[in-house]
């Protein structure tokens, strides 16, 4: 499995971010963090990322706006929304339940081993 560079965008909730960061790192990926959409975009200008995980609850910003900006400026980057219950609408991107870490593991496992057509 190729190591990916993953940017996690989440409001500053240390315990939640730390758990997600540790989980993605345990899957042997490199992890960067940003605490706002603007910080994420600035980071993406300087560093390549393969995947951006955007939490749906970022104070004062909608996940739809952050995702749209990432997709417009960095179309090569995969964007995934993390939402409690997996039910908050964040546009047409893949949505993962932020309360179920096994879903995040499954996402990275399936991205590493694409199914034959």
Image (cartoon, rainbow, N blue to C red):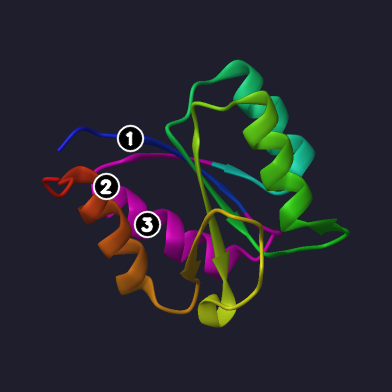
Residue found at x 53% / y 82%: 85
- Determine the secondary structure under disc 1: loop
Q: Nearer the viewer, mark 3 or mark 1?
A: 1
The picture places residue 83, in percent across and down from the top left corner, at 58, 71
The picture places residue 57, in percent across and down from the top left corner, at 72, 67
Labelled pair 3, 1 in contact (Cβ < 8 Å): no
Residue found at x 83% / y 62%: 59
- Determine the secondary structure under disc 3: helix
Q: Nearer the viewer, mark 2 or mark 1?
A: 2
Residue 4 numbered mark, or none: 1
The one of 86 and 100 positioned closer to us in this rendering: 86
- Residue 31 sits inside the magenta stretch: yes
75, above or below 110, in the image: above
Residue found at x 20% / y 44%: 112
The picture places residue 33, in percent across and down from the top left corner, at 57, 43
- Residue 115 sits inside the magenta stretch: no
Q: Name the residue under label 2.
A: 111
Other-residue count near label 1 (Cα within 10 Å), few / some / many at <14 / 14–19 / ≥20:
some
Labelled pair 2, 1 in contact (Cβ < 8 Å): yes
């Amino acid at each position: 499995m190729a190591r990916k560079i993953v940017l996690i965008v989440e409001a500053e909730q240390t315990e939640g971010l730390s758990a997600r960061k540790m989980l993605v790192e345990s899957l042997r990926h490199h992890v960067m963090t940003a605490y706002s959409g603007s910080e994420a975009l600035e980071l993406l200008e300087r560093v390549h990322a393969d995947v951006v995980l955007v939490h749906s609850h970022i104070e004062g910003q909608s996940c739809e706006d952050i995702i749209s900006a990432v997709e417009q400026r960095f179309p090569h980057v995969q964007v995934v929304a993390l939402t409690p219950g997996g039910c908050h609408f964040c546009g047409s991107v893949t949505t993962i339940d932020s309360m179920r870490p096994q879903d995040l593991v499954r996402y990275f496992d399936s991205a590493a081993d694409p199914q034959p057509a």
